[in-house]
């Protein structure tokens, strides 16, 4: 069972729903080690995406869906996360360009390109207490699952599980990128909001495959 445009759209809709549902939680995390707008930023962005989804023409590919998400997030989300998450979707679109249906290997390529896009844009490494701490273990787990023969849904579930663990693992870290890096040791004990939202978005990808 490969995943196509219906899945891509379902992923985006589910992402918008979970971001809205967890808006206050993400704001609270960002209030602790940032400026308190992360939930607001992403909610504004995904709400704008949803408003544009119905305008996608018949025959759109998953890449077309991700391009729409990318351009909308980049243009509507202020703050660091807009360009970062927008670039993730832009690179994801590039990785699956022209494909109508995505198998496990294509999903790994999509996730890898998305993560690489965030790194290209933000230059964060694993352990810097950013969304990369969710994305990188997610890519590794998805890749291992695909190599072991997992189907598409199982690949996405492996990514989501690893992203959740990666987000939780940001709690004891000092930040080296983003606003939280200004706090030094005061960031210790707080989960990175971008890692948390990334884990939610990757969970949405797995749920959309159900
Ligand atoms: P801002 O910090 O501009 O208010 P947001 O609050 O929306 O933007 O997003 C903050 C999140 O962005 C952080 O929790 C972190 O995960 C992520 N982030 C910030 N800088 C970087 C970076 N250079 N690379 C990767 N992620 C980053
Ligand atoms: Mg913020
Ligand atoms: Mg801000």
Image (tube, rainbow, N blue to C red):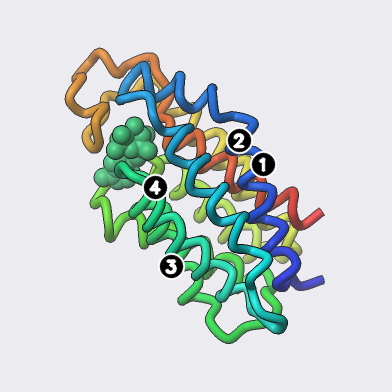
Mark 3–mark 1 distance (CA, rounded to whole Å): 21 Å
Q: Could you say where residue 62 lies in the image, as x and y percent from the top left?
A: 62, 73
Answer with the quarter of the image where residue 127 lies. top left
| Residue 150, position as x, y percentages in the image | 73, 61
Around disc 4, counting alpha carbons within 10 Å, would you say few (fewer than 14), some (14 to 19), or many (20 or more)? many
Specify whether tag 4 is near ligand 1 (CB below 8 Å). Answer: yes
Q: Is residue 48 above or below residue 37?
A: below
- Spot occupied by residue 49 in the image (x, y as percentages of width and height): 56, 56
10 Å crowding of disc 3: few (<14), some (14-19), many (20+): many
Which of the 4 image quadrants contains residue 170? top left
Q: Quadrant of the N terminus?
A: bottom right
Q: Residues within 10 Å of mark 2 (few under 14, many from 20)?
A: some
Can residue 127 be seen by looking at this rendering? no
Residue beneath disc 3 = 90
Q: CA distance from mark 4 to mark 2?
A: 14 Å
Position of 186 with respect to 191 (left or right) is left
Q: Which residue is mark 2?
A: 20
Q: Earlier in the sequence, mark 3 or mark 1?
A: 1
Instruction: Find numbered disc 4 in the image and state the secondary structure of the residue it sits on.
Output: loop
Q: Residue at x 39, y 45 (%)?
A: 132
Label at residue 17? 1
Q: CA distance from mark 4 to mark 1?
A: 17 Å
Question: On the picture, is 110 further left or further right than 59?
Answer: left
The residue at label 3 has a CB less than 8 Å from ligand 1: no
The residue nearer to you, when weighing 163 against 60, is 60
| Mark carried by residue 77 | 4
CB-based contact (under 8 Å), mark 4 and mark 2: no
Q: Earlier in the sequence, mark 3 or mark 2?
A: 2
């Amino acid at each position: 069972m490969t995943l196509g445009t219906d899945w891509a759209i379902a992923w985006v809709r589910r992402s918008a729903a979970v971001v809205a549902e967890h808006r206050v939680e993400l704001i609270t995390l960002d209030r602790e080690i940032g400026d308190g707008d992360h939930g607001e930023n992403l909610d504004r962005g995904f709400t704008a995406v949803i408003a544009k989804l119905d305008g996608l023409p018949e025959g759109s590919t998953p890449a077309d869906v991700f391009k729409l998400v990318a351009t909308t997030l980049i243009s509507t989300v202020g703050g660091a996360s807009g360009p970062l998450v927008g670039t993730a979707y832009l690179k994801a679109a590039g990785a699956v360009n022209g494909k109508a249906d995505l198998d496990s290997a294509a999903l790994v390529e999509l996730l890898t390109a998305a993560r690489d896009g965030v790194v290209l844009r933000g230059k964060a490494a694993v352990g810097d207490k950013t969304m990369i701490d969710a994305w990188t273990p997610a890519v590794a787990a998805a890749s291992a699952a695909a190599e072991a023969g997992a189907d598409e849904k199982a690949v996405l579930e492996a990514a989501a599980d690893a992203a959740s663990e990666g987000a939780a693992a940001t709690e004891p870290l000092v930040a080296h990128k983003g606003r939280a890096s200004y706090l030094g040791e005061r960031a210790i004990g707080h989960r990175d909001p971008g890692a948390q939202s990334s884990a939610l978005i990757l969970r949405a990808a797995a749920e959309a495959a159900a």
